[in-house]
Image (tube, rainbow, N blue to C red):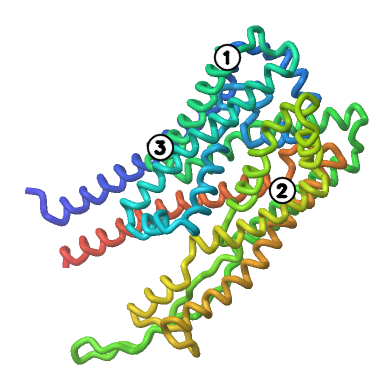
Amino acid sequence: MVSAAEQLAANINFSALAKAEELKKRIWFTLGALLVYRLGTYIPLPGIDPSAWEQIFRTQAGGILGMFNMFAGGGIQRMAIFALNIMPYISASIIIQLMTTVSPTLEALKKEGESGRKTINQYTRYLTVVLAAFQAYGIAIGLEGAGNVISEPGWFFRISTVITLTGGTMFLMWLGEQITARGIGNGISLIILAGIVAELPSAIVGTLELGKQGALSTGLILLVAVMSVVVIAFIVFMERAQRRLLIQYPKRQVGNRMFEGQSSHLPLKLNTAGVIPPIFASSLLLLPATVANFNAGQGPDWLTTITTQLSHGRPLFLILYLSLIVFFAFFYTAIVFNPTETADNLKKHGGFIPGIRPGERTAEYIDYVLSRITVIGAGYLAIVCLIPEILISYAAVPFYFGGTSLLIVVSVTMDTVAQVQGYLLAHQYEGLIKKSKLRGRRR
């Protein structure tokens, strides 16, 4: 006969193996989904001449197209079916979140909980289709006017391009949701990360080749390498920085026993918004420049002016980029962290900040602290993103060494590793609980 303790021990071992197998499946699913994405960036649009487009792309790789190509994982350079990448979805998310703050209907949906969130997500998908179709049509028109890139220009090519690129964006949106639900990490962020990392080796080789040809000096290449290491270390330090608010819980009596008051901390990240502000800023700058860039020299003069002024290193581009980063740092922080809700939760559980009255005063104090550390966080994002942008503009360094790309790579990697560690710690915690029950039964 098998004792109860032996049976429980067998269940613990089986549960640990099952959960380790589940984590392995999640990792393999994530890698498989990202592999599907990378394969799609090598499938060209029907009806274009890849070699002719490659020549045109090289002449404009230092501007908006090069920046867009970085986020698309090389999809723009190859004019692939995933050329739009996930950027229309990000732009749609920005617009819907902005509308949530000004539209009573969307604000009411947000307060409904899970059902309201699903409705808002559905609106975001609809808007993604509209934005992707708009950008895809602009790309089709631009390709037709780019010379001998298109063999048979006309409405058939335009419609097929719109359907293909829009379908590619919607597929990537679905793929990102599947990674989030069935894999490890945030799917949308991992798709952007995979595109940047996959093109990084070619960027390094290209930079070394420029140094070999004499286009870049050895000192400049060493400066870029050192700067990349320093920026990565700075990003890691700032992303881990926190402002901890002391939370005190009063004494409480359970039966005849009096329990001492406990204390804990409310951690407020220096950069609560994470990698979202530079992604949102880049996405909004790319959205109006897509059509303007393709029609430059053929459309109205104002289109040419927009294309010129939105080039990297231009004062208008830097000012808009800085302004959008700062704006979204505060805006997204206000969305993801609600001081009033946090203060109410502390009050419900009897917690309070020493010297601050619970309720409204606590919410005001948390908002006061959060606003001031967000100023530092926004300044950190601006420094990390703008200084490399200037270097890229004046030294012709590839975009993959820019602050935005390094910020995305480091931040998303840290978040993914943290999720894996949290997953493993949760399993170890469950195992310890079951082992303690096993010891209790043996006694």
User: Quick one: label 3, few (<14), some, or many (20+) residues within 10 Å?
Assistant: some
User: With respect to residue 306, does 430 lie above or below?
Assistant: below
Q: Residue at x 76, y 51 (%)?
A: 386
Q: Which residue is mark 2?
A: 403
Residue 62 seen by the camera: no
Residue 132 seen by the camera: yes
Q: Which residue is mark 1?
A: 155
Q: Residue at x 64, y 58 (%)?
A: 327
First along the sequence among labels 1 and 2? 1
Residue 196, percent from left and from top: 64, 36
User: With respect to residue 241, does 417 lie above or below?
Assistant: above
User: Quick one: label 2, few (<14), some, or many (20+) residues within 10 Å?
Assistant: many
Label 1: element kind = helix
Residue 164, percent from left and from top: 52, 21
Residue 6, percent from left and from top: 17, 52
Tell me the kind of residue under disc 1: Trp
Numbered circles on residues, count: 3
* Image side of residue 359 versus residue 369, left or right: left
Seen from the viewer's position, the closer of residues 271 and 433 is: 271
Seen from the viewer's position, the closer of residues 349 and 29 is: 349
Q: Which residue is mark 3?
A: 178
Label 2: element kind = helix
- Mark 1 vs mark 2, CA separation in Å: 40 Å
Q: Residue at x 65, y 48 (%)?
A: 281
Tell me the kind of residue under disc 2: Gly
- Mark 3 vs mark 2, CA separation in Å: 29 Å
Callout in the foreground (1, 3)? 1
